[in-house]
Amino acid sequence: MECEGQVTPEVSGIRHSVFYNENGHIDRRGNKEYVCCKQGYSLTSTVSRKRRRRGCTRTGCKAKLAILKVKENNKYIVIGFNEVSLLVVQVERLENVGFVKRDVYNYLRDVRGEVIRHDAELLKEHFLAKQEKNESFYFKMEVDLEGRMGNVFWLDARSRRAYWFFGDVVVFDTMFNTNPYGMVFVPLLGFNNHRQTVLFGCAFLTSETTDSFVWLLEEFKKAMPGEPPKMIITDQDVAKSKAIAITLLTTFHRYCIWHILNKITEKPGIGECVSKMCKCIWGMDTKE
């Protein structure tokens, strides 16, 4: 049976409690609890004489770290930890803090908005500088009523030249977590006569909606020389499919085989015949 004994004097603002066994001796296993110097509450004193005020009073802080020394390996492990709000400890009560968690989030939102607006201006200046050097550089940037950047699309002269020669088939894909602003990155890709990847254009979209994809494909058609692509390949996304049906009326839309195989292999019981299925897809020369 264990019971908490006396509290040791304060050291650097922290007190620790030791445990005593039933014989009144200190438990040598090394059980200790480190608590804040403001733990508990001060007892009301009836002494009338004046005393010098202490800078650190007890306000009921519940911060505590409990550790245990393991006899087998002579190491310490943490068996209990209570964290507290540092600001509440400093001002003694929550209502004295002056602001709440929502205020912090709102401040971070405003700061992030200023950074995004600044970066958007830098991006536009960069595009304008590229356009001054080469008139074939094309970009389109949407801006809302509050001056915030919306969808962005751009390409250069090399991309236009690549599309003129190899624009029969376009791979339309979306990527995530490539920027700190939560925007969707969309590269428009193709393949040259050496089976190398070529870049037709890039975009940042604010969302993966049909309207955003329609805007992108319309800008893509305006910027590119020649006719729309004969075929466009995407993943099985409903918004992309709707946008392609609206903007690319003469283009064949096909799903990417990589995405199809990934979804098929997730089905129960398919794993046993994946190799045969892949051989059927990639290794057969005839329709049958």
Image: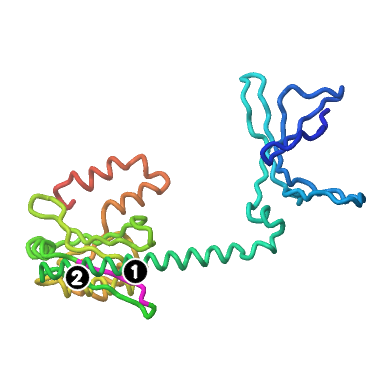
Nearer the observer, 267 or 255: 255
- Residue 137 is labelled as none
Task: Report the amino acid beneath label 1.
Answer: Ala
Q: Are marks 2 and 1 in contact (CB under 8 Å)?
A: no
Tell me: residue 9, above or below residue 91.
above
Q: Secondary structure at mark 1?
A: helix
Magenta-drawn stretch, dominant element (helix, strand or loop): strand
**What's the coloring here?**
rainbow
Instruction: Work out whether residue 261 or residue 222 is closer to the camera in this orientation and state it.
Output: 222
- Rendering coords of residue 67 (x, y %): 67, 32
Amino acid carrying mark 2 in the image: Leu
Q: From the image, tell me which residue sits under label 2.
A: 128
Residue denoted by label 1: 239
- Image: magenta residue range: 147-154
Name the residue located 83 percent from the left edge and 28 percent from the top edge. Answer: 1
In the foreground, 275 or 21 = 21
Is residue 129 inside the magenta stretch? Answer: no
Q: Is residue 273 left or right of residue 100?
A: left
The location of residue 202, given as percent across then percent down, is 23, 63
Q: Is residue 150 magenta?
A: yes
- Spatial CA span between label 2 and label 1: 31 Å
Closer to us: 92 or 2: 92
Residue 33: image location, x then y, percent: 72, 35
Residue at 23%, 65% (x, y): give it.
253
Q: Secondary structure at mark 2?
A: helix
In primary-sequence order, the first of circles 2 and 1 is: 2
